[in-house]
Each structure stands twice: as structure tokens, then as C-alpha cells.
Amino acid sequence: MKKLIMMMLLFVFVVVGAACADANDTSEEIDENEETTEENEDIEVEHELGTTMVPQNPENVVVFDFGTVDTLHELGIEVTAVPKANVPDYLDVFTQDEYEDAGTLFEPDFETLANLDPDLIIISGRTQEAYEDLSELAPTIYMGIEENDYMNSFENNVMQLAEIFDVEDEASDRVSDLLDQVDALQNQVPEDQNGLIVMTSDGSLSAYGPGSRFGIIHDDFGVEPVALDIEEATHGQNISFEYVSEMDPDYLFVMDRNAVVGGEDDAVTTLDNELINQTTAVQNDQVIHLTPDYWYLSSGGIESVQQMINEISAITE
């Protein structure tokens, strides 16, 4: 009788143990499925060119905007391909063979992209004409900077990338630090002195004011503009040397376009004439040459914005 009872108890233990094991396996399977679901969850991204469903933590990423490349690099996010022509010097790591050449900013290499089969493509203004075609290859989002709302646009772009790649905490810290620096710069910029932003190109001049491509100098950094009626055009308002002389700015901020696209005359040569040399900016040694890598090629990146702040901070020293 005792032997029979022992056998029955052993049978019960076996059955209960198997049931618990099955329950645990089922629970683990459910947990794994939930984790997989969370990892594969898509994010709805609204941008200037539409609304796109983007996979969270995409692994195969192609970027046609050097400001975005800058930000992703600063946040430790890998990219697969970039347009290798005109890569800013400080991002020259992306010219190495481990990164694919995606074409140019204006003409993507669709054959290469099709072979890469990207999970996500990120573009900005220079590539926007190809948006529809790129969207047929992979989810494509536009991450350009709004020139008349630069720092807010910058913050929104960085935090959108942070959400996609699940690095919100680090991104928030970096953005907060930069915004604090901008606030400090606004309080340090001389209120009684004005500035004029010019771009030189093959011996000619164009001017930029508030709300323009380089308007962050006035709008966010706090430098008083020498004039408020400067045309808000991509390549600025065409001006003469006489115009600069008449405006006589306290500070002259200079962008050398030929340093990026090539050409015979650099900014120093172009501005070396009697009219410019007699301005207050030149007489007081207050000519600031803006670095094209940050201002022209990769505007809107974490590192580029940091360097832009640094360059304008020089006028407060």
C-alpha cells in the first residue's frame, strides 16, 4: 500500500512539474514576443515632405544631410552610406571604405541604394527633389533646418533622431547644453554694435539678414543686424562693395563659398579693397571668417552648432 501511495505522489509531482515548466516556457515565449514587438515598433515621423512610418533602431541607414551625419556620429549611431563628395573635413571618417558612397547630395546613386536595401533614408533640402523616388526604396524622412526658427528646428530634429534610435537621454543633455550656451552668448553680445553677414563667390558678394540661411547669427545669437530689409534668398541678396561701405558694420561675418565649391578668388582676396578696408569692421579687426564645414555643409548638427556658437563667441572676448 505504501509503495502504491509513493508511486501516486511521484506521478503527481511529475505532472505538476511538467505543467510549471510549460507555464514558464509559455511565459518566457510571451516575454520574448513582447520584446520583439517593442524592438520592431514603427514610429510615425511627420516632416516637411509628408508623414513616414520609420522602424525604431534601423540598422541600415543612408544619410544625405551632413548635419544629420554629424548628429548621429555624436550620438554614437552608425550609418551605412553617405554622399562622399564634399564631406566636411571634421567628418572625414565617412570617406573611408567601410562606408558606401550614396552618390551626391543632388543626385543619389539609385543602383547602389537598391543593392544596400536601406531600412531608413534621411535627406534635407539639397536632395528633396528625389524624395518620391527614394521613398520607393525605403522609408525616407526630411530633416532640414527651418532658417527662420533655427534653434527650435535644430532641437526638434535632434530629438526626433533620438526617438528613432532610442538615445533620448543623451540627446536631451547635449541639446540642453547648447541651448544654455546660446542663452549665455545672447547676454554677452555687445548691444551697441551691429553686424553684416556676407558670402563671397568668384569675386562677387551677397548679403544675409535675419531669417536667412545664416540668420542664426542675428535671430538666436543676438547680433544686431546692420539692416532689416535684406532679401531672404538661398544665395543671399546681391550687393556691391559700396553697399558694405555705406552700411559700415561693426562686425563683418564672412562665408567663403569658393572654399567649398572651388573657384579662383578666396574671401580674403575678394574683400581686400579700399572700400572694405575703410569699414569699421576691418579697422577694428572685427572680421569673422565663418568655417564653411559648419555653416555651409553640415549646418544643424550637434558638433557644427557647437562650433558655430564658438565662432560667434569670439566677438565677446
Image (cartoon, rainbow, N blue to C red):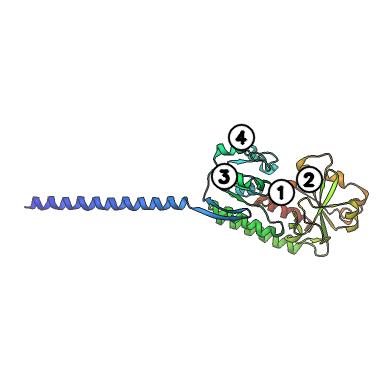
Checking the image for residue 136, the label placed there is: 3
Checking the image for residue 294, the label placed there is: 1
Residue 316, image x, y percentages: 78, 59
Q: Amino acid at mark 4?
A: Asp
SS label for mark 4 = loop
Q: Are marks 1 and 3 in contact (CB under 8 Å)?
A: no
Q: Amino acid at mark 3?
A: Glu
Q: Give the foreground label among 4 and 3.
A: 3
Name the residue at 63% across, 52% down: 143
Residue 274, image x, y percentages: 93, 49
Residue 144, image x, y percentages: 66, 52
Q: Are marks 4 and 1 in contact (CB under 8 Å)?
A: no
Q: CA distance from mark 2 to mark 4?
A: 28 Å
Q: Amino acid at mark 1?
A: Tyr
N-terminal-most mark, 4 or 3: 4
Residue 71, image x, y percentages: 62, 50
Q: Amino acid at mark 2?
A: Arg
Name the residue at 71% across, 51% down: 307
Checking the image for residue 157, the label placed there is: none
Residue highlighted by disc 4: 97
N-terminal-most mark, 3 or 2: 3
State whether residue 178 is above or below residue 96.
below
